[in-house]
Image: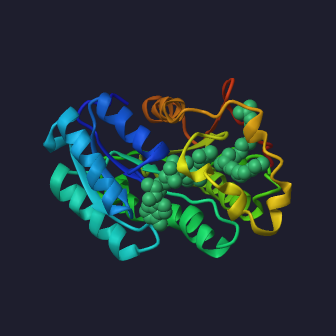
Amino acid sequence: MALYGKIAVVTGAAMGIGRAITEILLQNGCKVALLDMNEAAGNDLMEVLEKLYGEERTLFLQCNVESEEQIKAALQKTVDTFGGIDILCNNAGILNELTWEKMVSINLIGAIRVAYLTLEHMSKLNGGQGGVIVNTASIAGIEPIASSPVYTAAKHGVVGFTRAMATASTALEYGVRFNAICPSFVETTLLIGIGDRLGQFSELDKSPLDKIRLLDVSEVAEAVLELVTDGTKNGEALMVFSDGKEYATFPSFI
Ligand SMILES: NC(=O)c1ccc[n+]([C@@H]2O[C@H](COP(=O)([O-])OP(=O)(O)OC[C@H]3O[C@@H](n4cnc5c(N)ncnc54)[C@H](O)[C@@H]3O)[C@@H](O)[C@H]2O)c1
Ligand SMILES: CCCCC/C=C\C=C\[C@H](O)C/C=C\C/C=C\CCCC(=O)O
């Protein structure tokens, strides 16, 4: 997919990986709607981006991915402002085993909710032009992390949802590709003070974090760009490690 002039929606865009995805899409000519619940961080980032890329190429919309109403309003505003949606980077997420039901609500249900509501604009079945959806999962979506069982469950859910939707989209001719990005540990606020958010599993935090190089957000954004632009990629889970990236392989029974 050539990106110049394409319209992207990024959730959890105000900081961390979402911010890096937003910037790489802007650098490649996209218009980007930044959705995030953190209004202050979103507005601060907009000031920076407007100076770099021009006011007409970015739009910040305060949006909690737990709220169907807020997502619907944000997507409609994006379509009204930019004229459609070609790319969704479904990235908002938290890591907190203490508030595990909320974590499932944001990391898994939120991602599904945003994807379904975006398809109402993007799917060829609904009069859209087709496009691509990249869901931010994690290596924890491929391999269990003992200190984070519910985070692991939610991210496995994101990978499963992505792969099933890729097949469904092909069969039902939505014209939409679905891929998952699965990073290792990335240097963002998500990992700050993590020991306090692992609850009964905190003693398992033996911190590989001290032994491996944390990824820079730009490395994850580069891998997302590959999944967005390479039209042959559908139903893939691209793992990003400190020493390179690799597509996950899965058994097949059906
Ligand atoms: N940092 C890592 O090591 C790592 C590794 C693999 C995957 N991930 C995943 O990457 C994604 C981004 O995480 P990050 O590391 O950039 O974290 P981050 O905390 O730096 O950024 C997360 C962003 O999501 C937003 N957000 C959180 N809950 C939201 C909600 N309910 N609605 C809307 N926005 C919300 C926050 O306001 C924030 O701007 C998450 O899905 C996370 O699970 C992170
Ligand atoms: C042990 C401390 C864990 C605290 C953080 C828990 C979960 C973090 C999840 C992130 O999404 C990253 C998930 C998994 C990373 C897995 C493997 C690391 C591979 C190392 C490498 O890059 O080579």
- Please give the name of the residue rendered at 15% of the width and 37% of the height, measured from the top-left corner: 54
80 to 53, vertically: above or below: below
* x and y, in percent, of residue 254 in the image: 76, 50
In-image side of 82 versus 141 (left or right): left
Q: Quadrant of residue 215?
A: top right
Query: How many labels sit on residues?
Result: 0
Q: Nearer the viewer, residue 227 or 188?
A: 188
* x and y, in percent, of residue 227 in the image: 50, 34
In-image side of 115 versus 126 (left or right): right
* x and y, in percent, of residue 36 in the image: 38, 59
Query: In this rendering, does residue 222 appear at all?
Result: yes
Query: In this rendering, does residue 170 appear at all?
Result: no
Q: Nearer the viewer, residue 176 or 106?
A: 106
In-image side of 98 versus 144 (left or right): left
Q: Quadrant of residue 4?
A: top left
Quadrant of the snapshot with the N terminus: top left
Q: Nearer the viewer, residue 80 or 44?
A: 44
* x and y, in percent, of residue 170 in the image: 52, 47
- Please give the name of the residue rendered at 55% of the width and 39% of the height, measured from the top-left corner: 234
- Please give the name of the residue rendered at 68% of the width and 30% of the height, measured from the top-left corner: 213
